[in-house]
Amino acid sequence: MNKTARFSYGKTPDGKVFRVPGTRDMVTALLNPKEKKSFFDLITLGTMGIEVVLFFTLPTWLKQILFIFVFFFWRLAYNAGLGALLKYQSDSRGLVRMAKKYKIFDQEANPKAYRWLKTQLSMKMGDDYDFATSPIEYNTWLLYRQLVDLILMNDFTSYILFILSWFNLSPQSSFIFGDALRWTGGLFMILFNIWVKLDAQRVVKDFAWYWGDFFFLIEQSLTFDGVFEMAPHPMYSVGYIGYYGLSLMSASYTVLFVSIAAHALQFAFLVYVETPHIDKTYNPPTLPKRQPAVDGPVSSDEDAPIINSTLDKNATRDFYSYYFRRDLIVFKNFDLCRSTDLASAALMTYSFITPLIIGGKAGVTFAIGQAIFWRIFHSYGLGALLNAQSQNKLFTRHFVKWGGGVDQAFANWKSIYNLSLCMTYITFFVACWEMYSLPNNWTYGLTLLRHTLGLFFISLHIWTSVSIYEVLGDHGWFYGDFFMDDQQPTLIYSGIYRYLNNPEKIVGHMAIWGMTLMANSWAIYALALFSQVSTFLFLNYVEAPHMRKLYGNQIRKEAGLTKTLKSAAIALPNALPDKFHQEVSKLIRETAELQAAVNTTKNVERIVKEMVEKVEKTAEETAGAVGDMVEAARPKLQEVLEETKTLLETSRSRLIHPLVDNNIGTYDLSRYSIKIKTTSNNEESGGITLGHPIQISWTAPENHGERDWIGIYKVTANKERHITNISSRGHWQWTTTEQGKTQGTLNFKGAQLPWKAGTYEFRYHHDGKHNVMACSVAFEIVAPKAPAVQDRDAVERCMLRLIQNVLGNDPERMPMTPVDEYIGMGENEAQRIAYTIKLMYGVEFAWEIILADKCVARLTKRINHALDALAPFSSVVEEKKANGHVVSSSSPSSQPSKSNGSCSPSLMSKVSGDSTIY
C-alpha cells in the first residue's frame, strides 16, 4: 500500500498543490502536562486559570453577574469576532493579504517575527510540517487556529463556570418524578451532545473544524455521513443540545435563556458567515446556455422578420409557460384585489372575532366547535377528495364537464386547500386564546418553561414548513402530483427530506403542541391529540398510497435520522474498551452506594449538593478579604467613573464627526479636481441616461491621502459643501491604490451608479474621511427615451442594454441576446429595471415579475401585453392615436421599422459597452 495515500493534498487559490501536514488534537496538547506549551497555549491556560480563580474567590451574587458578562464576551468574540475575520478572508482573502502586507512570514523582511512564529507554530506540529516551505495560506490558517483555540476554550470554561454559579440546589418540582426526569434528560442530552461533536470531528477533521476551506481547499472527496445525515448543520443545531441538558440539570431559567441567546448567536454565525462561503465555494451558480450569435449584422430588411419571428416564438412559448403566478401560500402573496384572497381574509376575520364577541362559555364552545369542524374538513374532507382525485381524477372531471381542464382544477384546488389550512390553524389559535389566562406568577411550577417550549415549538414548526416549501415548491406544497401528470416521477431527497422521510408527521405539527402547552387546558390537549391523529391518518391513508403508486421502489425505507440513530446505538457500546465494561460492572456490583445512586437520582443530587457546599465554604473563607478589598477600592472606582463621565461630556463635540480630519487646512484644495468625461447621451434633455456608465478623471497633489475616495450624491443631499454628512449607499470608489499617483480615471457602472433620476455631483473625499476636497459640476441623470412599442426590435435592444447596465456589464452575468437568461440578478437589480420601465412607458411592474421573466424577449412581450391591457390610458397608445394609427403590439404582422439611431446593431450580437441605446 502506498504510504502517501493517507495524506491529504491541499490547493491554494493561486493553484499551488501541497501535502497538508497532520495536526494534533488541541485539547490533548493543551491539557497534557507532558506536552510542550507554546506562548499561545500559555495565554489560553492563563485566561482559563484567572476565570477559575475568580469563581472560587468571589461571592455568589458577584460571580453570577460576572460570569454572565464573561461568557457573552467570549461568545461574541467567537460569533462576531471570528465571524468578521472569516468573512474578511472569504470575501477578499483579507487575512492572507494582511500576512503578505506585514510580511510576518518573510524571513528577510521580518526575521524576528519569522523566527518567533516558526518556533511557536512548529512546536505543535509533527515532523511532516516545514514552516519555511508551507504555503502562506496554510501558515496563516495555523496562526488563525491559535486565536480560535483561545476563544473556544475560554468560551467553554466561562459557560461551565456560569452554570455552576447559577446552579439551583433546591428546585421546586410539582411533579413526583420531576427531579429524576430532569437529571436523566439532562445527562442524556449531554452524552448525546458529546457524541455529536465527536462524530462531527471524525467526519470533517481539523480542516473543516477550523474553517480551513476559507484559506485553501483539499483535493479529496468529502463524505458527510454519520451525524451529518441526522440533522442539518449538526455542529450548530443538535451539537448544542448539551446547553439545554445543563439548563435542565441546573434548574435555572437564567441558564436556559442565556443558553438560548448563545445558541441564537451561533445560528447567526452560520447564516451570515459559513453558509454564504459554502455556497460560494461548493455550490457556484451554473452558467446558462447562451444562444449562438449570428456571424454578421442584419444585412437587410428581409433578414429582420426571420430573426424577429424566431425571437417571438421563443418569447411567446416561455412567456406563457413561465407566467408569473402569485398563488396565496398561507399569507404570502396576499392581494386584496384578488377575489379569492379577499374572501379568505373575510372568513378568517369572522372566525377570529366571532368567539371574542360572543364571550363566556358560549364563546369557548363556539371556538372549540369551529376548530373541530375545520380539522375534520381539512384532514377528512379534503383527504377524501384527494383520494378520489388519485383514484379517478374526480376533481378534474368536474371542471372538464363544464369546459375547463386540469389547470382550472388545480388552480381552484390550491385556493381551497390554502383556505382550509389557514382556517385550521387560525381556529385552533382562537380556541387556545379562549382557554388561555395570563399567569399571575411566571416562576411558579412549569409556567415559564411551558411558554418557552411553546414558543420554541412554534418556531420549529415555522422553520419546518419553510424548509418543506423550499424543497417541494408550489407544485409539491399543493399536492400537484395528484393533478399534473407531466412531472418527472423521480424522488430527490434533499433539504429537510435528507434527514426525515416525512417531516410533517414528526415535526410538522409542533405549532399545535406549542399553543397547547401555553394554553394548558385539557380540552385543548384533547383537540391537539385529535389534530395529530387526523394528520397521521391523512398522511398514511391518502398521501402514502399515492406516493407508492407514483414512485414505487424509489421511496426509501429509512431516513437519515433513523439510520444514524441505529448506527449510533450499535457503535457506541462497541466503541467502549472492554476494560471499561469490566470496571463499570465491578463498580456497580461491589459498590452499593453507587447502585443506590443509579436507582434513585436523589443521591446523585445529594452528592452534587455536598460538593457545592464545600466549594461555598472555601469561597466564604476568602469572602471577607475580598469584601474589604472591594470596599477599599469603592472610592477610587467612583472617582474614575466621575472622571470618565466628565471626559465624555467635554469631548462630545469630537464624537459628532469621527470621520472628519481636523487638519485639512494643510492641503491645497485648488490642486484637487474632478471632471466628467462621459458626455451627454440624451438628445432631448441633455443629460446622462439612467444606468449609462459614467467615466470621470481626477487630479490631486502628491501628498494626497492614501485612502482618498470619490462618491456620487444628489446636489441637495448634503447640507455642507466641505463635509459629506450622508451615506454614499455604495455609490463610491477608491481613487487609487498606488502611492504618489496624482491623476487617474474611474468608471462608475452598475450598482455604483444612482438609479433615480435627478441632479447629481461627484465628491472627492480625503483619506477615508468625509472631508470634501473637490466637487464636479452638477449633471443630470434622466429617464431613457422609450422606443415606439411597435418597433419590437428597438424595444428589445433597449431592454437588453438596460439589463446589461444593471448587471454592471459583467459578461458572466449579463445576457448577450434577447433570448439569453440573465443570472445572478437580485431584488435590488430587478427594482431598478422596474423603475426604469415605469419611467419609459408608465407601466409599473413588481420586481418579482422581472425575475420571473428571466430574459429580454419575455420581458419585452410582457411590456407589449401591459400596454395593450392599459389602453387607452397608456401614454404610448395615446401617442399612437395622436399620430393617426394604432398598431397592436402583440400582432404578428407588425414589422419593426428600420432604425437609424443608436440601437441599430444586430439583436443577436452583444451590445457594445460604449454605444448608446437611447
Image (cartoon, helix red, strand yellow):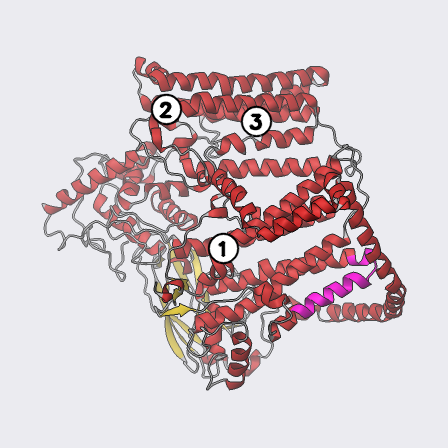
Compare marks 3 and 2 and give the one earlier in the sequence: 3
| Residue occupying the point 47% across, 67% down | 22
The local crowd at label 1, few if under 14, some if 14 to 19, many if 20 or more residues have their Cα within 10 Å, is some
Label 2 sits on residue? 482
Segment tinted magenta in the rendering: 45-63
Characterize the magenta stretch by its predominant secondary structure: helix
In magenta segment, residue 61:
yes
Say which residue appears at 60% left-offset and 48% top-offset: 193
Q: For the residue marked with disc 3, what is the amino acid?
A: Tyr
Q: SS class of the residue under badge 1?
A: helix
Q: CA distance from mark 1 to mark 3?
A: 43 Å
- In this rendering, position of residue 44 left or right of residue 64: left
Q: Is 610 left, or right, of 105 in this rendering?
A: right
Q: Residue at x 58, y 72 (%)?
A: 660
Element on which disc 2 rests: helix
Label 1 or label 2, whichever lies nearer to me, is 1
Instruction: Report how far apart the C-alphas of labels 3 and 2 lie in the structure.
Output: 24 Å
Q: Quadrant of residue 405?
A: top left
Give the residue at mark 3. 425
Mark number displayed over residue 202: 1
Indicate the secondary structure of the residue bearing disc 3.
helix
Which mark sits nearer the N-terminus, 1 or 3? Answer: 1
